[in-house]
Image (cartoon, rainbow, N blue to C red):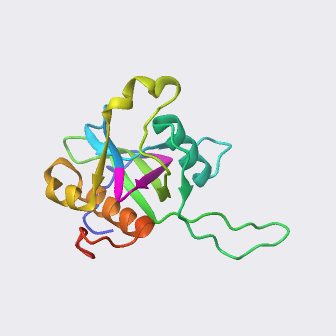
């Protein structure tokens, strides 16, 4: 892949599977400033060993926001005695997490990105995430674009796509622009 950082020869890159959900309600998506990564992100986290990606996406969203969402994810029609189609992510990303000053990458996330519909904007995290309920903010597509310097470009693009996919185009949304 052109433009990607690669591990140095002989260095192993640790990769973890994660799942993310751009939660949409009333024309906006919920984001928070991630403590460790120092960037605005939707809810998400690591896929546990006994989970499928869409299950991890729903679990992480509920833990971090208290919201029960319906995933807007196509499901294939391939089934048999040994095969079952599962919800497909809207995007599938390889994300550099630990990049060293010399450009080596030692940790990456393989991210299953889903879009989800919530019936409310009332954020009520559970467990360890309870203290962080005030840190969530809802952003419309226009607000994401107007404040693009606060967000990574993929967050703006995927946030706008999620809003369009879940709520459809709105009068205040400029359509196909990120």
Q: Could you tell whether 165 is left or right of 178 in the image?
A: right
Q: Is residue 106 above or below residue 129?
A: below
Q: Nearer the viewer, residue 171 or 1?
A: 171
User: Overall secondary structure of the magenta stretch?
Assistant: strand
Q: Can residue 78 be seen in this view?
A: yes
60 lies above or below 20 = above
The reply to whether the magenta stretch includes residue 22 is yes
Q: Is residue 36 visible?
A: no
How many numbered marks have been drawn onto this rendered protein structure?
0
Percent position (x, y) of residue 147? 15, 53
Numbered range of the magenta stretch: 14-29
**Please, is residue 89 above or below residue 47 in the view?**
below
Q: Quadrant of residue 68?
A: top right
Give above or below for 171 relative to 95: below
**Viewer-proximal residue among 144 and 95:** 144
Q: Which of 96 and 87 is in front in this view?
A: 87
Which residue does the image show at 28% across and 69% down from the upper left?
A: 2
Q: In this view, does 131 lie to the left or right of 143?
A: right
Percent position of residue 176, x then y = 27, 76
Quadrant that contains the N terminus: bottom left
User: Where's the C terminus, which quadrant?
Assistant: bottom left
Magenta-drawn stretch contains 94: no
**Image x and y of residue 91, in percent:** 44, 64
Q: Is 112 positioned to the left or the right of 87 in the image?
A: left
Q: Nearer the viewer, residue 72 or 53?
A: 72
Q: Residue at x 45, y 28 (%)?
A: 129
Which residue sits at x=59%, y=54%? Answer: 54
x, y (%) of residue 17?
51, 49
């Amino acid at each position: 892949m052109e433009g990607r950082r690669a591990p140095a020869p002989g260095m192993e890159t640790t990769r973890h599977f994660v799942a993310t959900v751009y939660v949409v309600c009333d024309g906006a998506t919920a984001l928070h400033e991630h403590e460790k990564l120092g960037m605005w992100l939707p809810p998400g986290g690591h896929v546990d060993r006994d989970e499928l990606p869409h299950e991890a996406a729903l679990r992480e969203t509920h833990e971090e926001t208290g919201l029960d969402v319906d995933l807007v994810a196509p499901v294939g029609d391939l089934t048999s005695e040994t095969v079952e189609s599962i919800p497909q992510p809207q995007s599938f990303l390889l994300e550099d997490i630990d990049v060293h000053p010399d450009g080596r990458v030692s940790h990456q996330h393989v991210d299953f990105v889903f879009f989800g519909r919530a019936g409310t904007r009332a954020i009520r995290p559970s467990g360890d995430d309870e203290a962080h309920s005030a840190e969530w903010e809802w952003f419309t597509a226009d607000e994401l674009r107007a404040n693009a310097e606060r967000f990574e470009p993929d967050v703006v693009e995927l946030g706008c796509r999620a809003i369009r996919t879940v709520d459809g185009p709105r009068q205040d949304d400029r359509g196909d622009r990120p």
